[in-house]
Amino acid sequence: MKPAVKSSIRENVCLYFMLWTSSLPSFMILRWVRHRKDLNPRFGLIIMEVIFKITRQQENSHPVFKSYVLEVEPGNTILDCLNQIKWEQDGTLAFRKNCRNTICGSCAVRINGRSALACKENVGSELARLEKISSLANQSQATPEITVAPLGNMPVIKDLVVDMNGFWNNLQKVAPYVSTASRQVPEREFLQTPQERSLLDQTGNCIMCGACYSECNALEVNPDFVGPHALAKAYRMVADSRDSNTEERLENYSAGTQGVWGCTRCLYCDSVCPMEVAPLEQITKIKQEILERKEASDSRAIRHRKVLVDLVKQGGWIDERQFGMQVVGNYLRDLQGLLSLAPLGLRMLVKGKFPLSFEPSQGTEEVRSLIESVQNTD
């Protein structure tokens, strides 16, 4: 083998080692590669020009977009690109970061309108997602653009940095710690079986990044709602065999619309969670625990679920007359609730929309058997 070839192989191996093991940001290594023109053809490195539109905003002011043009590689993370902007073009850009490895959750931002971790998402995947959206909308751009904005449902301090006090305060409302006050504390430790511990694995992965909180539709219209992050943590407490306050917790989580009944079930929290905690799934588990323990007369939210299932079992679909009277009127016991239905009932009657009779749907027996089989399985 010729010495020149040996040298080339040695350089290639060294460069690959630098790219994959160096603590330096990848864009700093790539800048060195660009100056080594002789290495580019052999490595086939793809360098592309991308416009980053970053939201710039001071506290209590209107946001504006500022554009930065970068030469990046598809594998560069969004955090790499933000660092490059701050270190090379605009040192005033403010954003949070820490681990750079999907562990701490500090760098969560909205990337192209979707909350995510800047250290997890890369340029290539984001551009591929945008290209798919653009092809569906029959739109195309000569130079690709990536927008980066602060998380939603939280006030902005500066640029991409948000005030998370409300986020943490809502977490405190669910008492996110194991309570053993009413139990005898063992001399050494509480023991759990592997099965009991496995119930905590999914919720235990939450890194409190705020992505689910940012996209929560319920929070946008109901500031009292504690948020999906808090309720995912709440189920972690409910499922913990060491906790002694399960009944008190469920009573708290079921009160009003600040708890589980305030969730709109939009599924957005599940789709943006970088750790696959699935907050909506945990909220649903809390609801199941509540419904198993509570009677329909305890609250309107519980009646709504129980009456709906009962009526579908009876007739295959909902008898709207019975549904309103049983849920809002509490089985004819709540006179004020019944009177509140009168204006709506009169308008429906005048418009010919009030159902004067009810006919069970075809296949009612099959529907009933399906519901009962699911209930028996649970």
Image (cartoon, rainbow, N blue to C red):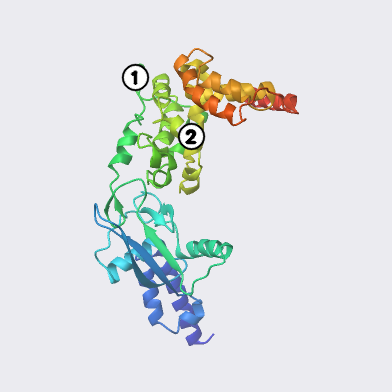
What's the mark number on residue 105?
none
Q: Can residue 199 be seen in the rendering of this structure?
A: no
Q: In x, y percent, where is residue 211?
A: 41, 47
Q: Residue 271 placed where, x, y %?
A: 50, 47
Find numbered disc 2 in the image and state the secondary structure of the residue it sits on: helix
Q: Give the mark nearest the N terminus, 1 or 2.
A: 1
Image location (x, y in percent) of residue 65: 34, 63
Q: Which residue is mark 2?
A: 282
x 29%, y 66%: residue: 86
Q: Residue at x 58, y 62 (%)?
A: 136
143 vs 334: above or below: below
Answer whether labels 1 and 2 touch (C-beta < 8 Å): no
What number is the disc on residue 185? 1
Q: Amino acid at mark 2?
A: Gln
Circle 2 packing at 10 Å, graded few (<14), some (14-19), many (20+), is many
Dot in front, 1 or 2: 2
Residue 101 at what x, y percent from top left?
39, 54
Task: Check the picture and name the quadrant holding the N terminus.
Answer: bottom right
Mark 1 to mark 2 CA distance (whole Å):
28 Å
